[in-house]
Amino acid sequence: MTNRKTRFFGLRKGGGLVALLLVICIFILFLFINLSIGTIKIPIPELIRFFTFNELEDPINRTILMDIRLPRILLGIFSGAILAIAGNLFQALLRNPLADPYILGVSSGAAFGTVLTIALFGAGGVLPAIFYNLPIMAFAFALIVAFGTYFIAKKGGKIPVVDLILSGVIMNFLFNAGTTFIIVYGWRNVQQASFWLMGSLSGAVWEKVYSMGIVAVAGVVMGMVLSNSLNAISMGEEEAMNVGVNVEKLKIFIFIAGTLMTAYTVTATGIVGFVGLIMPHTARLLVGPNHKVSVPASAILGAVFLTTCDTIARSAFQPSEMPLGTITALIGAPVFIFLLRKSRK
């Protein structure tokens, strides 16, 4: 039993730490680059001076940084981290590198719940009913989709890759159709709704940043606390039970936690795909399969990826802004095809 526990709970013990430090350095580098780039460029030395001594030579740059750019990038950092962690959890649970909230249809379910709530309580202004019901409705429908996709794809004790993808596609089509129906006949602000559904960080405010930061930190802590169990279950349910993991309870908890994190992110950013698919896979390639290291690495890479895509979306197509989901899809779709072909082999 001791050797088996060592096998599962000590995956590449001590390995990947150097790569994790490299990932952190990449995060810091891209943070300054993304903060610098925009309609008005802020020199990186000024940014370093601001974060070191709280000084900026130009007061206009300070206003841009504090009121517009910094909350937007921080929202992207936390949202990317949450989606990457959720993808990491789903991939470990399903033992499938192609599982993520977008592919499983969770994001479309959350979007349906969000749009339904807005249509019911009004699209203008911020009403108390919207504030209290929006996350709940998004979570409820996302959870329905998550379990629906899981049980449709499940055959016996296994979940085939193709069946999982097809189940997610079915759920995506179903709830996207429902969302479109509500937008056309309920919300009616088609242009605003379409832009939001394709992903955007343009509505970033400090209140959203604070709440999203709490969820992101909680997700990282949860993933690291569950790392031993995730290491075990990634090797197979039977082997995980042999080392004392309550697999069924862990499944339910991860499905609920991953769905809750995804739903909360969708209410703030809209649908942003492929972050939870690509970043956990990249993290495992860099730091190894040990979730004690791959969870924080996934979160950091997700933050870097989403904020960089947002910088491209808001800066490369001026004076227009490209929807964030379009940029992530342009990068994520080819990677998804590569992973699908690799998994078939």
Image (cartoon, helix red, strand yellow):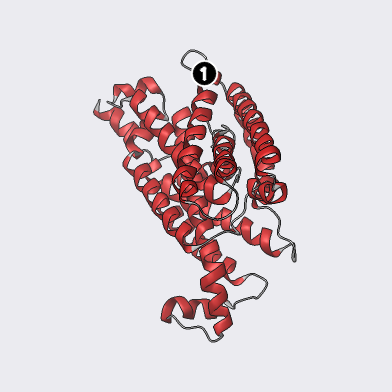
Where does the C terminus fall, quadrant-wise? top right
Q: Residue furthest left?
A: 2
Q: Residue at x 25, y 25 (%)?
A: 1
Q: Nearer the viewer, residue 282 or 211?
A: 211
Q: Nearer the viewer, residue 256 or 33?
A: 256
Residue 164 occupies quadrant: top right
Q: Is residue 300 above or below residue 251?
A: below
Q: Provide residue 106's location: percent of width, then percent of height.
A: 54, 35
Viewer-proximal residue, 122 or 61?
A: 122
Say whether residue 161 is visible: yes
Name which residue lies at 59% across and 57% down: 201
Q: Residue furthest bottom?
A: 57
Q: In the rendered view, would you say 342 is above or below 193?
A: above
User: Residue, x 69% and y 48% (percent of image)?
Assistant: 189
Q: Is residue 301 above or below residue 290?
A: below
In percent of width and height, residue 162 lies at 62, 23
Q: How many numbered badges does the structure rendering display? A: 1
Looking at the image, which residue sits at the far top? Answer: 156
Left or right side of 104 for 229: left
Please state the horizontal and vertical placement of residue 32, each as a whole percent of the image.
Answer: 54, 69
Q: What secondary structure is found at the residue carrying circle 1?
A: loop
* Amino acid type of the residue tagged 1 in the rendering: Lys
Residue under label 1: 154
Is 79 above or below relative to 311?
above
Q: Is residue 32 visible?
A: no
Badge 1: residue crowd in 10 Å (few <14, some 14–19, many ≥20): some
81 relative to 313 in the view: left or right? left
Residue 122 location in percent, x, y?
58, 47
Q: Residue at x 58, y 33 (%)?
A: 105
